[in-house]
Image (cartoon, helix red, strand yellow):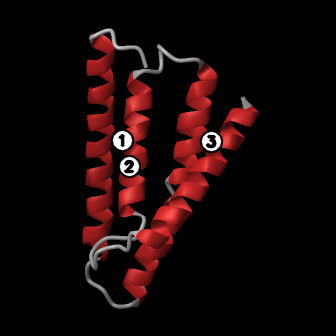
Amino acid sequence: MYTAVFVGGAAGSLLRELFSLEIPGAPFLTATFGINVAACFILGWLYAIRHKVHAHVLHLGAVGFCGGLSTFSSFVAELERLAEAGSSLVLIALGAEVVFGLAAAIAGDTLGRRRHSRGISE
């Protein structure tokens, strides 16, 4: 279990760093917006199939990979930078990340349930 979390976390963290360097944020979004929304989608999908996969897969994917890929600390630091720069868009950035993150998690859950209900093995 610990190895799964470690390997998943390392992979997620490396992928986050790669994409955070390549995908700049829009003026009203944080640089980690897309990364965090993608992690929410993956978490939703993993939640939907949790009864079909081994617990170590969930530790690797949900705890490790998504935990490493998403980053609350960077998100908060980016919001603080927006606030310090005098941007009045901080609340929009915060709201957009929460709304789109929840929508992505729901979409991932819906996709996982639909695939599972058709009998497609994960």
How far, Cα to Cα, is label 3 from label 1? 16 Å
Q: Amino acid at mark 1?
A: Phe
How far, Cα to Cα, is label 1 from label 2? 5 Å
In the picture as drawn, the residue positioned furthest to the top comes out as: 119
Position of 43 relative to 81 (above/below): above
The location of residue 66, given as percent across then percent down, is 52, 44
The location of residue 116, given as percent across then percent down, is 33, 15
Q: Which residue lies under the disc numbered 3?
A: 8
Callout 3–callout 1 Cβ contact below 8 Å: no
From this viewpoint, is residue 71 visible? yes
Q: In what element is the residue under mark 1?
A: helix
In the picture as drawn, the residue positioned furthest to the right comes out as: 3
N-terminal-most mark, 2 or 3: 3
Q: In what element is the residue under mark 3?
A: helix
* Point 27% across, 11% down: residue: 118
* Label 2 Cα neighbours within 10 Å, binned few <14 / some 14-19 / many ≥20: many
Q: Is residue 2 left or right of residue 9?
A: right
Callout 2–callout 3 Cβ contact below 8 Å: no
Q: Is residue 18 left or right of residue 46?
A: right
* Point 72% across, 28% down: residue: 1
Q: Amino acid at mark 2?
A: Ala
The location of residue 65, given as percent across then percent down, is 56, 43
The location of residue 112, given as percent across then percent down, is 33, 25
Badge number at residue 41: 1
Badge number at residue 38: 2
Callout 1–callout 2 Cβ contact below 8 Å: yes
* Point 52% across, 17% down: residue: 53
Locate the C terminus and report the quarter of the image it occupies. top left
Position of 108 relative to 9 (above/below): above
- Report which quarter residue 31 is drawn in: bottom left
